[in-house]
Every structure is written in structure tokens, then in C-alpha cells.
Amino acid sequence: MPPAASVVIIGAGFAGTTLIRALERQWPGGLRLTLVSDESYTTFNPMLPEAVGASVFPEQVVVPVREMLRPGCGSRFIMGAVTSVDTVGKTLVCRTLAGEMSVAYDHLVLAFGNRARLDLLPGMAEHALPLKTVGDAMHIRNMVLRRLARIELETDPELRRQLGHFIVIGGGFSGVEVAGELVDCLASIRRYYPLVQADELKITVLHGTERLLPELSPGLGAAALASLRRRGVAVRLQTRAQSLSAEGVVLSTGELIAGHTLICTIGTEPNPLARQAGLALQGGRILTEADMSVPGHPGLWALGDCAAVPNLHDQSTSPPTAQFAVRQALHLARNLMARTRREPTRPFSHRSRGMMASIGHLKGVAEVGGLALTGWPAWVVWRAYYLSQMPSFGRRLRVFLEWAWGMFFPPDITHLRFTRSHELREDEARRTAEAEQGQAWAERARPTGTDGR
Ligand SMILES: Cc1cc2nc3c(=O)[nH]c(=O)nc-3n(C[C@H](O)[C@H](O)[C@H](O)COP(=O)(O)OP(=O)(O)OC[C@H]3O[C@@H](n4cnc5c(N)ncnc54)[C@H](O)[C@@H]3O)c2cc1C
């Protein structure tokens, strides 16, 4: 019997984890499966806006990768960042906790997603708060809480207004969801900040085209717009940001929108590994054949956000969504098995099941199976769908209870700082040194008094 082929998958996102679970289910023992990812967990990105709005705890939008693998299938998880791929020698190098490690493969699947782009506009790298990782979501959430605490201590009315102005750049899914979550969150936590007035808090969404959620039908975009505006969100359509600064956003018209918190949901860039491996890109995504193999590189496959996978269903390129990443993974599992059995592979073909967005306040917009839903029914469908995607019953129950809790009680305003004891001492020592230095300066500058005459 020939030795089992080694399949290595890079990236434990929607695509990578669905693929390894499908392979484990379909052909346990027939392949040696290895998943390499730089984080120990998978992030449920569609729930990141809820983590920003404190509707769920950040721990609830992630699932440990090891929990998702099937015991007894012999799959291996390596936590490490892949730094290079040699598609000729069929090896990759990854940086792990134990140092650099080389891994050989027969089939390599690239599922490493893409990254937030921080050089799209001048000032973005320094001033924008991107929303792409769970760390980004926690950072924005903490920033919102700090802004409220800061306003309480500020006496300058203009500065108070700028501190309380949260500007969301981009009115696609993430932008609309973040704005909807933030407006709910601010309304319910303001009770804990008695010195902050309601009219000192404002959310503005800047969107470049004439309607929100361009991925959905015009009616649903209009419903999202009406819902946000009704709840006090200022939505500016056909408005393009030109640059970002500490003062706010400068528009293409030259107008400055003053605000200190700039949440950016626009722009992605390819993972540097795609370029390092010398692969052909299309619109920043790895070019693949219809069966998801990478042309000119035997044994190499790509899917999910990092790949431009043709969709036979409508002759288009698959969009970068979780729905397509999952569908492609299930299809690639079948193709990989076919290839190892020397059977023909099949082109990827998928008809979108619909799209949905939660816009806060128990409201959503959805297009499911040709049916357009708005308001509460869309919100219920949204939540039911993401709950069903959670990998274990225990996790589903925890998220369900958290959501139920959030319907009756205000969000948690704990702002955890991960300061360790030795850092506290260093802080104290630094503050003492600064105070002593300040005192020495003051003494030197003090005019000579009677005693010193
Ligand atoms: C805020 C937000 C909201 C969204 N909402 C929706 C939605 O409502 N509906 C929807 O369908 N889609 C939504 N998406 C898009 C969806 O999340 C992506 O399409 C999906 O995550 C793509 O899956 P993926 O597996 O290709 O990539 P990812 O999920 O990004 O996973 C990539 C994995 O690769 C790992 N990795 C990267 N580089 C390396 C390396 N060098 N070495 C090792 N590992 C590496 C990463 O750590 C990660 O685990 C949203 C995205 C965001 C950011």
C-alpha cells in the first residue's frame, strides 16, 4: 500500500477549518492532515461588530482550533506563522514557539485569508482603527470606553464633542454593523457616565457610493439607512474620505469632519505569503483554476479570501465571504480526495444562499433564498444562522445565553488592562523618577529667597 499523502493546510479560518473537518469526516486515515496557523483559534469575523458593541465577550467570537479537530483522526495542528513556501521542493517553513520548523507536503492548501490595508489613505496607518481581528475589536471597544471616561474629565466643550464623535469609514457590511452596534452600546452604557450628555455622543458613517450595503438589493440598503438614521446615526452617502489625522477625517471636498475615533472598515491587501511564493494574483487574490488548484504548481491549492476562485454557477469570481469560503472548503475536500485516487476533479459552482447583516437594536436586513427580510425577522435569522455555525453545543449555549442576557441587561463596561506586576513597578519607578526630576528643575528655577541670601 502506498504511504498516505500528506496534506498541509495554511490558515485556520473559515476555509481551513471547514476543509480539515470535511477531510477528517470523509476519509479518516487515508491522508496525513496538518493544519498550520499563526493563531490558536478561529475568529468568527461576522460577529466582530458585536464584540465592538459589547453584545458578546471577545472570547465568544473565537473557537480554539484544537477543539474543532476530530479526536482519533490523527490530524495535527501546528501553531506557527508560515514565513516561506517552496513550491518546487514542496516544503514550507514556519516560525513556532520552538523556533523555525520545516514541513514537507504532497498537497499544500493556501487558506491564509487577507489583511486590512493601512496605506489606502494618508494618515490611515497612524489614526485608523481597522476591524479585521479580534484584537482590533477589543481595541475599539476599549477605546470607546476610554473616550467616555475621558469626556467626563474634560471641561472644554469642543474637545468633549470631538472625543464623543465616532466616525465609521465604509458603509458595507462591517461598517453598517459596527455603527448599529455602537449606537446601541452608547445608549445603554451612558448611564454609567453621568457627566456625559446624550448630545455629546455622535456616530457618523461615511460611505462613498449612493447606497449602503451595495452587496444587497437597493430596498434593503434603504431599510438599513432608515433604521440607522432613526436611531440618530448621521449617514453621509457619496462622501469620500481623503485623509485621516488626529483631528478627524478630511473629505475629498476639503471639509474636515472632526472626531477622535476613526473606525475603518475599508480596504484589504494580500497576505505577504502570496507574493513570497511567487504566485500570480488577480485583484490581490491568488489565481486558481476552476477546481481550486493553482496553475503551474502541482499539489498546490488555494481557497477562501486569499484566492480568486472562479464560480461556474455564474461565471464570476467568488466573493470574499465566509459563505463562499465554507462552500469552497467542502468542494475542495472532494477534489483532494479525487486527486489522490487519480479521479477527475470538478469545477467549483455555488449559488449564493443570500446575505444578511445585523444592524443593532434587534434589527437586521437579509436576503435569504430570494426572500427579502428586514427588522426583527432578519435579525432572528442572522442570529440563528451564526449560532448554528458554532462548532460545539457548549459554545452555542454560551453564546445563546450571552445574547439572551444582552437583551435585558446593559453591556459590560469592564475595560481590562493586561498590566503585569513587574510593569506596575516599572511604571511606579518611572513616575517617581519623573517627579524627582520635576522637583529638581523646580528648585533650580525657584527665585533665591531670604534664606539663601
Ligand atoms: C468585520 C468583518 C465582518 C464580516 N462579516 C461577514 C458576514 O457577515 N458574512 C460573510 O459571509 N462574511 C463576512 N466577513 C468575511 C469573512 O469573515 C471572510 O470571508 C472569511 O473569514 C474568509 O475565510 P478564510 O478562511 O479565507 O480567511 P480567514 O478567516 O481570514 O482566515 C485566515 C487564517 O489564516 C491565518 N494566517 C494568516 N497568515 C498566516 C501565516 N503566515 N501563517 C499561518 N497562518 C496564517 C490567520 O490567522 C487565519 O486564521 C466579515 C469579515 C470581517 C473582517
Image (cartoon, rainbow, N blue to C red):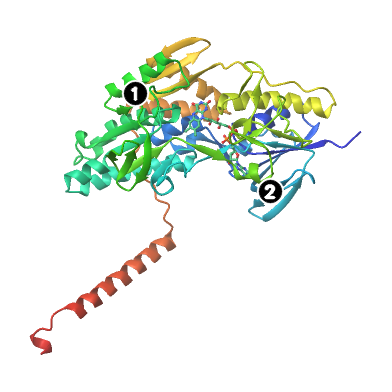
Q: Which mark, residue 84? A: 2
Task: Establish if 320 lies above or below 143.
Answer: above
Which residue is found at the position 45% from the left and 35% from the top? Answer: 266
**Alpha-carbon distance for marks 2 and 1?**
45 Å
Res. 72 image quadrant: top right
Amino acid at dot 1: His
Sequence order check: which comes first, mark 2 or mark 1? 2
x, y percent for residue 405: 38, 28
x, y percent for residue 82: 66, 47
Task: Establish if 32 lies above or below 368.
Answer: below
Q: Which residue is mark 1?
A: 361
Q: Circle 2 — which element?
A: strand
Which residue is found at the position 46% from the left and 18% from the top? Answer: 216
Marks counted in the figure total 2
Q: Quadrant of ligand 1?
A: top right
Q: Circle 1 — which element?
A: loop
Res. 411 image quadrant: top left
Q: Quadrant of the C terminus?
A: bottom left
